[in-house]
Image (cartoon, rainbow, N blue to C red):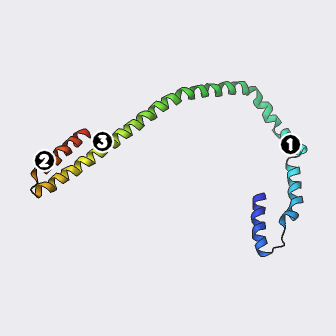
Amino acid sequence: LDKTLLNIEGLGRQLYPQLDLWATAKPFLEDLVKEKYSMKNTFEKLKEQAPQLLKDIPELPALAISALKKLDKMKDLSGLYTQQTDSIVKQLKDNANKQTSAIFAGALVILSGVLATNALWLASGVSAAVGLVFWIKSR
């Protein structure tokens, strides 16, 4: 509500510089806050919720024990998830390295073909051999 009032006041002051919404709205906002957070209102809310709270109190120890067991189980699973995540990351890195080697091998094979058409047989052979090495590495 305060933020909205601030935005409206900013726009209003562009249209009418003497506008002071805070002076007008301050008593209303103070009354609203006093009413919403008053002891009377707090006790009324507590009175409304008391039957449900009294009904739920006997279940609290069992719920607390269950929550602690679940937390303990989650700690055990977090180690497993960490191992699985590390394994997946390693596999992704290996796949990226293999893919890079395969692309490099393909480029060298294409280069050897280009060199062979220009009668540069030695360079073509070296390029093909290096391409073969990278292709084997990518497997």
Foreground label between 3 and 1: 3
Residue 129's place in the image compared with 56, above or below, is below
Question: Which residue is located at x 77 percent, y 75 percent?
Answer: 15
In space, the residues marked 1 and 2 are separated at their CA atoms by 88 Å
Q: Please name the residue that numbered disc 2 is placed on.
A: 125
User: At numbered mark 2, what does the secondary structure look like: helix, strand or loop?
Assistant: helix
Question: Which residue is located at x 26 percent, y 48 percent?
Answer: 104
Residue 126's place in the image compared with 80, above or below, is below
Residue 98's place in the image compared with 57, above or below, is below
How packed mark 3 is, by other alpha carbons closer than 10 Å (few <14, some 14-19, many 20 or more), is some
Q: Where's residue 126, x and y in %?
A: 15, 46
Q: Earlier in the sequence, mark 1 or mark 2?
A: 1
Quarter of the figure with the N terminus: bottom right
- Per the rendering, the mark at residue 105 is none
Foreground of the two, 101 or 8: 101
User: At numbered mark 3, what does the secondary structure look like: helix, strand or loop?
Assistant: helix
Tell whether 84 sits left or right of 32: left
Q: Please name the residue that numbered disc 1 is placed on.
A: 42
Residue 50 shows up from this direction: yes
Foreground label between 2 and 3: 2
Residue 139 shows up from this direction: no
Cβ–Cβ below 8 Å for labels 3 and 1? no
Q: Residue 50 falls in which quadrant of the image?
A: top right
Question: Which residue is located at x 30 percent, y 45 percent?
Answer: 99
Q: Earlier in the sequence, mark 3 or mark 1?
A: 1
Q: Residue furthest bottom?
A: 15
Quarter of the figure with the C terminus: top left
Q: Earlier in the sequence, mark 2 or mark 3?
A: 3
* Amino acid type assigned to the residue bearing label 3 in the image: Lys
Q: Where's residue 121, x and y in %?
A: 10, 51
